Amino acid sequence: MLRVDDCVVLRRVSMGGGEENPEPPTDTGSRRTSNVLKNELLLHEAVIKNDPEAVQRVIKEPLDVNSRNNYGMRPILMAAWHGHTDAVQMLINYGASVNTINKKQYTLLMCAARNNRLSVVNFLLDNIDDVGLDAFDTDHQTALHHAAIAGHTHVVRRLVHAGANTSTTNKQGRTPLHSACEKGHVDVVDFLLGHGADMLAKDEEQNSPLHVAVENKQTLVVQMLLEAGNPTNLENSKGLTALHIASSHGCRGIVEMLLSADCDIDRQSKNGNTPLHMACLSNNVVIAEILIAKGADLNALNTRLQSPIHIAAEQGYSEICKLLLSAGANIEQREQGGKTPLYIAARGSFTAIVDMIIKTARLEYTPKKRTRPKTPEERRKWKCNPDLDVSIALQETDQNLEMILRKLAHKQLSPGEWKKLAHLWAFTDEQIKAIEHQYIGPSSYKQHGYRMLRIWVDSLGPDLDPIEELIDSLNTIEKKNLADAICKKLMRQKEKSEKKPDDKTCVVS
């Protein structure tokens, strides 16, 4: 093996451009001969295979010790890349340049650092006067960046102890700490934080290492940064805090950590969005639940005057809408264009959301007093046994009511009659238009009517009998024949279901 001292002497001659690095042989046409090209190829192969004997043998032949392969890599760069320290020493002794770079401007130190070649890194730092410790490649990254990105803790430690600058930035304006946080290399992050790395440094988009860690869902790194005292409410160029980003990406553990660290739950970005807005935009139901449980403002408005439910309705996210409605979101708020969440959902043909919003709006619905008394004939038909507490015995299951509503909407009500019932039951014009918005052809009114009937049933209190209310309402809009038909059907079902002659059965009174 060649001695390091000999290597250093020859390296210095090479750097000075002396005789030890002769020009490659050429033919009369100033082109390298096929023999030279062959020797150079053999040298590259020997270096890659880490075959010292082959290197020594071929290097004595006519060739350029600094020749490039198709990737712009010289033999000494390949030796550093693969961690072949002996080959690096030998090539330097035979005149290889220590200042060489490849097409991406990787130096020897970068090649070694990028691939965790600590032996080569140590050799270069210990024996080369100007090793290019903070040199930049085409992405403006240093050897320390490369080691940090790859998570090579021992190489990072060696470079920093050798004086590598922890504040250098790449083309994105990111430091080695940003890079380590992005990839989740906890040990590297821990070392850099303990050796002067700035946790408040910001890249070109004003993202701190915490922003980057959250963006890439690096939970352990986020925890480490918070424990190191990283401020939680730093904003990037869009005004987004780490909580905004975590809420958007659905990082439950990170969201909970940030909230425990007193991150501002209602901080608004430059476009006015809060973390809850971000969770709604990304349809992250679990995150929205956490934020709401922690007291997030349900009705915060962004610069378009949109609350979270406007966004959920606009995107058609029914589960998010359901969550916001159950939590008490304001459904009357109008956005910048004057549109309510109901209008927005209808415009998008999100019928499930339309129906949910209308049901929510009708929670306070109270049926009007009956417009007329029952006739003696009706009373005879619907005699109730006073010994029973319930108002209906004829309706054995919800399935019975479902059949009645479906038949009424699809076969018995003519176009426009469902609206008469809707107005009678205090549906607003906006609600009726929202139901009508979904048009599927001339028979759309059937589906519109059925949806309205289902919404109406769901808005009735537990003390009201839907069939009794329906029959009375049909009579009110002068659909007595339909009311009577429902009554007769229920009576037939009652008679069929009776098994004992002395059974006591209650009917609608």
Image (cartoon, helix red, strand yellow):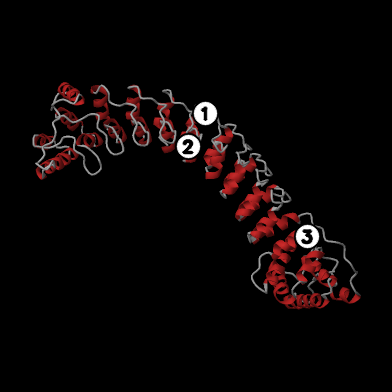
Q: Say few, some or many: other residues with alpha carbon within 10 Å of mark 3 (under 14 / 14 to 19 / 20 or more).
A: some
Position of 318 with respect to 51 (left or right) is right
Residue 421: x and y in percent read: 79, 67
Viewport quadrant of the N terminus: top left
In the image, 429 versus 276, the foreground residue is 429
Residue 22: x and y in percent read: 13, 31
Say which element carries label 1.
Answer: loop
- From the image, tell me which residue sits under label 2: 212
Viewport quadrant of the C terminus: bottom right
Position of 129 with respect to 252 (left or right) is left
Say which element carries label 3.
Answer: loop
- From the image, tell me which residue sits under label 1: 230
In the image, 427 versus 260, the foreground residue is 427
Residue displayed at 67% across by 41% down = 297
Q: Say few, some or many: other residues with alpha carbon within 10 Å of mark 2 (under 14 / 14 to 19 / 20 or more).
A: many
- From the image, tell me which residue sits under label 3: 428
Say which element carries label 2.
Answer: helix
Image position of 327 with respect to 92: above or below:
below
- Distance, label 3 to label 2, CA atoms, is 49 Å
Image position of 480 with respect to 282: above or below:
below
Position of 465 with respect to 97 (left or right) is right
In the image, 8 versus 1, the foreground residue is 8
- Distance, label 1 to label 2, CA atoms, is 13 Å
Residue 57: x and y in percent read: 8, 36
Going by the numbered disc 2, the residue's amino acid type is Val
Q: Is residue 397 visible?
A: no
Residue displayed at 21% across by 42% down = 69
The answer to which image quadrant residue 160 occupies is top left
Image position of 443 with respect to 234: above or below:
below
Sequence order check, earlier mark of 1 and 3: 1
